[in-house]
Image (cartoon, coloured by chain):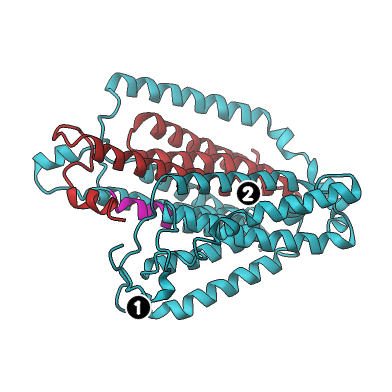
Chain colours: A cyan, B red
């Protein structure tokens, strides 16, 4: 019995690993010059499946926080983002002449392809050898016990949240700054995509149920992140999902605040994070230095601002441009899907 | 035989597949997908290395690194897609020669919509 209990997870992991690699090959494989919309959509759907299987694998490897983030951001949000981008591609033509015109830029020549394959194979063997040699080092416990020792001081009991928002809070601040940079750059590139016309039926009818449920889930993930898997990134992705649903049903703002407040929503996360960090510098002499009783309150404050800010940044990225086009806002009763 | 080996082999396979597609193909979507697959391989090394053999809880530091990596990857993907959209709409604007080789060329309806707002 105990033998079976040991073998079963290993067998499941081997199946997951094989499926993940096969799916990756399918996502990236296919015809060398195929660049049409249907081909791209097939790839993106396979990529979403790839992300969901990765999430299962992370969960099986004892990383539930990463599994949640992978499912919500890596598969869910990135999937929506990539799928929306396929709309701009031309549909594959039936006849040969226009098919040739639709074919993308010529791929590399056969000689170069052979060289690339050879180089990648050599690189893969080297990488595997290096990892094989470092297996003993990978297997030794290093930072784990150190985190567990200081965990009671950090203000949270989920060790991943403790690393992200206390022990290595500086990294997380910079990470949110990276996200902000990307969101600002995307807004500079032009107007946002127009919202799709509100579809009749299921999706539109589900919005009054789906959006509050997503907001509630986001709040739960934010709160529970202190002592169980969850946190600001997963919660922010849930809120962003609500924004995507709103955009899909004809609200071109995607649930973002009015243009006047959008910049504030975008910088909220970085601003609050920096303010808390500077307060720590003033009071304790350490940037982002907070320990003990006040730490849990400060972490909750940062995470709340981060959830709202991450959601605003992700929605901005999904809209693919400056979302402040319609000054009157959708609340003013603009017909869903009306040409802007 | 080490318990980590299957994960490391799969991770190297993902990295190799991603790197190959990134070098071989020129369409933006496939390249962005390739970067994401490559990243997933790197994440797999980190998560596998975080696992402790004898029932101990896994190391949370690599988990935090991967969480950060997932968010940075999606930010890079979004920026790449937006840049591609901007480049394509600028190209459709500039040269309307029939042999321009731009994939938006023979789709004036699409291009027109881009500039409606």
Marks 1 & 2 on one chain:
yes
Residue B10 visible in this rendered orientation of the protein: no
Residue underneath mark 1: A202
Marks 1 and 2, the one that precedes in the sequence: 2
Q: Chain of mark 1?
A: A
Q: Position of residue A306 (x, y in %)?
A: 65, 58
- Does residue A325 lie above or below B11 as drawn? below
Image point 43% across, 76% down: which residue?
A207
Residue underneath mark 2: A176
Give the extent of the magenta segment: A79-88
Image point 68% across, 63% down: which residue?
A304
- Does residue B105 lie above or below A308 as drawn? above
Residue B103 lies left or right of residue A153; in this view the side is: left
Residue A198 visible in this rendered orientation of the protein: yes
Viewer-closest of B98 and A2: B98
Q: Main secondary structure of the magenta part?
A: helix
Viewer-closest of A162 and B92: B92
For residue A261, what is the image quadrant?
bottom right
Q: Is residue B56 magenta?
A: no
Residue A102 lies left or right of residue A233; in this view the side is: left
Q: Position of residue A98 (x, y in %)?
A: 12, 42
């Amino acid at each position: 019995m105990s033998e079976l209990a040991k073998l079963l997870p290993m067998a499941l992991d081997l199946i997951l690993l094989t499926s993940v690699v096969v799916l990756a090959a399918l996502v990236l494989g296919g015809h060398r010059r195929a660049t049409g919309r249907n081909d791209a959509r097939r790839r993106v759907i396979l990529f979403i499946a790839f992300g969901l299987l990765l999430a299962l694998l992370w969960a099986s490897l004892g990383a539930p926080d990463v599994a949640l983030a992978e499912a919500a951001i890596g598969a869910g949000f990135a999937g929506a983002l990539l799928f929306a981008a396929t709309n701009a591609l031309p549909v594959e033509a039936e006849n040969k002449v226009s098919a040739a015109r639709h074919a993308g830029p010529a791929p590399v020549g056969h000689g170069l392809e052979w060289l690339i394959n050879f180089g990648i194979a050599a690189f893969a063997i080297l990488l595997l050898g290096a990892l094989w040699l470092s297996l003993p080092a990978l297997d030794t416990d290093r930072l784990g016990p150190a985190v567990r020792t200081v965990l009671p001081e950090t203000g949270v009991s989920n060790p991943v949240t403790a690393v992200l928002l206390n022990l290595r809070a500086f990294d997380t601040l910079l990470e949110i700054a990276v996200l902000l940079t990307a969101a600002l750059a995307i807004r500079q590139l032009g107007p946002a995509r127009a919202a799709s016309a509100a579809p009749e039926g299921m999706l539109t009818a589900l919005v009054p149920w789906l959006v509050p449920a997503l907001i509630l889930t986001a709040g739960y993930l934010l709160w529970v992140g202190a002592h169980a898997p969850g946190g600001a990134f997963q919660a922010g992705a849930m809120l962003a999902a609500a924004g995507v649903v709103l955009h899909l049903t004809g609200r071109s703002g995607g649930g973002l605040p009015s243009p006047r407040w959008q910049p504030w929503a975008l910088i909220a996360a970085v601003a609050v994070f920096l303010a808390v960090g500077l307060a720590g510098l003033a009071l304790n002499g350490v940037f982002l230095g907070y320990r003990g009783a006040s730490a849990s309150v400060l972490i909750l404050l940062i995470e709340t601002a981060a959830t709202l800010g991450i959601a605003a940044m992700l929605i901005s990225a999904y809209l693919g441009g400056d979302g402040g086009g319609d000054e009157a806002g959708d609340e003013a009763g603009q017909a869903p899907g009306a040409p802007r | 035989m080490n318990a980590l080996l299957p994960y490391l082999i799969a991770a190297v396979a993902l990295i190799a597949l991603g790197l190959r597609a990134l070098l071989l193909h020129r369409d933006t979507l496939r390249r962005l997908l390739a970067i994401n697959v490559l990243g997933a391989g790197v994440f797999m090394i980190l998560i596998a290395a975080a696992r402790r053999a004898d029932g101990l809880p896994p190391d949370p530091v690599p988990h935090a690194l991967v969480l950060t990596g997932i968010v940075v990857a999606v930010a890079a993907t979004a920026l790449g897609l937006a840049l591609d959209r901007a480049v394509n709409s600028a190209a459709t604007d500039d040269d309307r020669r029939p042999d321009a080789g731009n994939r938006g060329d023979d789709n004036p309806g699409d291009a027109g919509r881009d500039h409606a707002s």
